[in-house]
């Protein structure tokens, strides 16, 4: 089969072999933050990249900065060692150039310039020190990498600063920065009462500068992710993927109170949050509570994408930015892992008549499911349904909500298995309503039938038509198609009809042309 796709309507042809996209493979980024120093190497489908390498060291460069005006001496030594290691690793990975940025701690410390010179002298890596507004812009671009249509406000919390940025229509608007980083606040005099007063006053000033109410708030940064992890634990939430996790203002308030009522070591043991991060959670919780009280967001979304992803987004041409990250990542996986790359389009064309009334959100999930339907074929046949479900619900996809992950996973489960009863995934099904569960089963069984019926072009040999009012599922077969419609294919067609609650009917189809 020709591996090239024809046009997929609004999604266009795949771009992962495009020179602009290929140029974004093995992109290395070093982020020298006030709390952590991290290197990320991106690879894979450029619009929805995978993390080829991802390592973080909690150096706490900004520890004590508010009192001494200087970088934490121990953190400075640890950061230099980490950067030296990262530079050597990058050479081993044949990454042509690392891009490195430093944020608030290096920016504000009086010995920040000396540290930059030491890093360049010892490692050859040039640290670009960015100001708070640039930090806000890059973080907001990271959110746009994961949510192309995102609109609302981004709040990025680091160790020594907190930034806000407006986003909408694919671009970043007004930005503002503040000193509300938990490492800096940790050393602020005046006790808890004075700290709360300072946070409230700064937050009120931020609200005057950037009015915002009733929209979505996107949270970026390790301290926010730690609080989200604790919110999951409090709620006994079944899916532990942080990206696109949603909280309500009421849930945030309940979790902040819950954190204060529990021993930090107990919470650490329950959630796996590091000691260094957990030490900042009480102050970060105070900041988040005031943020929610002041800005009154409609809802709150956690973004695992931030400055580092924003730096990748910066290098993307506009036509790549406009692509759907879920579809591009799914296409990349099909090209890399499927037995017959390109068959997904043929399968989609065959089963599409069953889903003509589906809305746009559901249609993109149907396309993604077709692209991913065969990527687990190397797994043992008894476990392919589990591998598929795990992949869909835990893969590093952007542009997909949690309930959409479960819908996609369930449809792929039914691609390989008729029944979902008794699987270890049952707690996650609670994220879907009964209709969505039924729709996922229908999609899975449609793919199961189509992939069994023909291995190259089912739509040229047969035609599916569903009459929802009359409850008929009609399969029209050409002569060649009739020869392909063997016992296993017949069983899967009847299984699909049962999932639809329809009567199956087989008719003759005249050859086209």
Image (spheres, grey):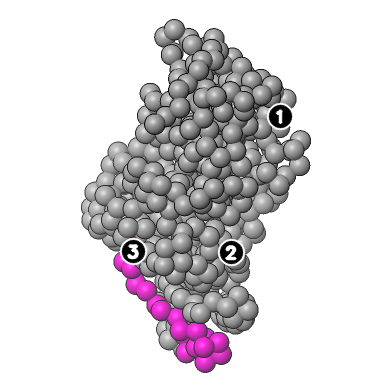
Q: Evaluate whether residue 51 shows in this view.
A: yes
Residue behind mark 3: 317
Q: CA distance from mark 3 to mark 2?
A: 22 Å
Q: Does the residue at mark 3 contact the one at mark 1 (Cβ under 8 Å)?
A: no
Q: Position of residue 355 (x, y in %)?
A: 43, 26
- Dot 3 crowding, Cα within 10 Å, few <14, some 14–19, many 20+: few
Q: Secondary structure at mark 1?
A: loop
Position of 93 relative to 503 (above/below) = below
- For the image, the number of numbered tags is 3
Q: Nearer the viewer, residue 257 or 402?
A: 402
Residue behind mark 1: 423
Q: CA distance from mark 3 to mark 1?
A: 43 Å
Q: Give the main secondary structure, helix, strand or loop, of the magenta stretch.
A: helix
Q: Does the residue at mark 2 contact the one at mark 1 (Cβ under 8 Å)?
A: no
Q: Nearer the viewer, residue 22 or 175?
A: 22
Residue drawn 74% across and 38% down? 381
Residue drawn 34% across and 44% down? 10
Residue 134 belongs to magenta span: yes
Residue behind mark 2: 52
Position of 474 relative to 304 (above/below) = above
- Mark 1 or mark 2, which is nearer the start of the sequence? 2
The magenta segment: 115-138
- Mark 2 or mark 3, which is nearer the start of the sequence? 2
Q: Position of residue 119 (x, y in %)?
A: 52, 86
- Dot 1 crowding, Cα within 10 Å, few <14, some 14–19, many 20+: few
Q: Evaluate whether residue 34 shows in this view.
A: no
Q: CA distance from mark 2 to mark 1?
A: 31 Å
Residue at the farthest bottom position: 121
Q: Secondary structure at mark 3?
A: loop
- Dot 2 crowding, Cα within 10 Å, few <14, some 14–19, many 20+: some
Residue drawn 76% across and 35% down? 382
């Amino acid at each position: 089969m020709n591996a090239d796709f024809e046009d997929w309507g609004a999604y266009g042809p795949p771009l992962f072999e495009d020179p602009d996209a290929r140029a974004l493979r093995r992109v290395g980024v070093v982020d020298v933050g006030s709390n952590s120093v991290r290197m990320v190497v991106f690879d894979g489908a450029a619009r929805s990249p995978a993390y080829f390498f991802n390592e973080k060291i909690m150096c706490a460069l900004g520890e004590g900065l508010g009192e001494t005006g200087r970088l934490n001496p121990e953190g400075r030594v640890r950061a230099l060692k980490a950067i030296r290691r990262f530079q050597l690793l990058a050479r081993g990975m044949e990454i042509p150039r690392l891009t490195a940025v430093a944020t608030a701690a290096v920016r504000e410390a009086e010995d920040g310039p000396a540290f930059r010179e030491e890093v360049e002298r010892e490692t050859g890596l040039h640290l670009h020190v960015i100001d708070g507004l640039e930090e806000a812009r890059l973080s907001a671009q990271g959110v746009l990498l994961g949510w192309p249509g995102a609109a609302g406000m981004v709040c990025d919390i680091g160790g020594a600063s907190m930034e806000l940025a407006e986003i909408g229509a694919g671009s970043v608007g007004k930005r503002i920065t503040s000193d509300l980083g938990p490492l800096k606040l940790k050393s602020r005099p005046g006790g808890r009462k004075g700290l709360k007063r300072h946070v409230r006053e700064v937050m009120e000033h931020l609200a005057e500068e950037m009015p915002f109410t009733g929209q979505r708030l996107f949270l970026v940064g390790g301290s926010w992710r730690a609080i989200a992890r604790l919110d999951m634990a409090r709620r006994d939430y079944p899916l532990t993927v942080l990206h696109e996790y949603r909280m309500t203002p009421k849930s945030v308030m309940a979790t902040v109170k819950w954190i204060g009522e529990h021993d930090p070591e107990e919470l650490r043991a329950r959630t796996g949050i590091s000691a260094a991060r957990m030490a900042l959670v009480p102050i970060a919780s105070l900041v988040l509570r005031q943020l929610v009280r002041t800005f009154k967001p409609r809802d709150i979304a956690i973004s695992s994408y931030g400055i580092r992803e924003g730096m990748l987004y910066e290098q993307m041409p506009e036509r790549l930015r406009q692509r759907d990250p879920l579809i591009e990542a799914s296409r990349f996986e099909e090209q890399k892992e499927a037995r017959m790359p390109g068959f997904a389009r043929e399968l989609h064309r065959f089963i599409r008549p069953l889903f003509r009334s589906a809305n746009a959100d559901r249609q993109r999930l149907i396309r993604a499911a077709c692209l991913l339907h065969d990527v687990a074929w190397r797994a043992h046949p008894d476990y392919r349904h589990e591998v598929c479900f795990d992949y869909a619900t835990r893969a590093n996809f952007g542009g997909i909500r949690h309930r959409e992950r479960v819908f996609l996973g369930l449809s792929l489960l039914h691609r390989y298995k008729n029944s979902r009863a008794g699987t270890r995934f049952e707690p996650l099904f609670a994220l879907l309503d009964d209709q969505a569960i039924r729709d996922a089963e229908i999609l899975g069984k449609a793919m199961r039938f189509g992939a069994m019926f023909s291995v190259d072009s089912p739509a040229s040999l047969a035609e599916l038509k569903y009459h929802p009012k009359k409850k008929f599922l009609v399969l029209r077969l050409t002569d060649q198609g009739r020869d392909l419609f063997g016992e296993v294919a017949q069983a899967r067609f009847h299984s699909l009809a049962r999932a639809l609650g329809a009567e199956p009917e087989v008719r003759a189809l005249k050859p086209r042309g």
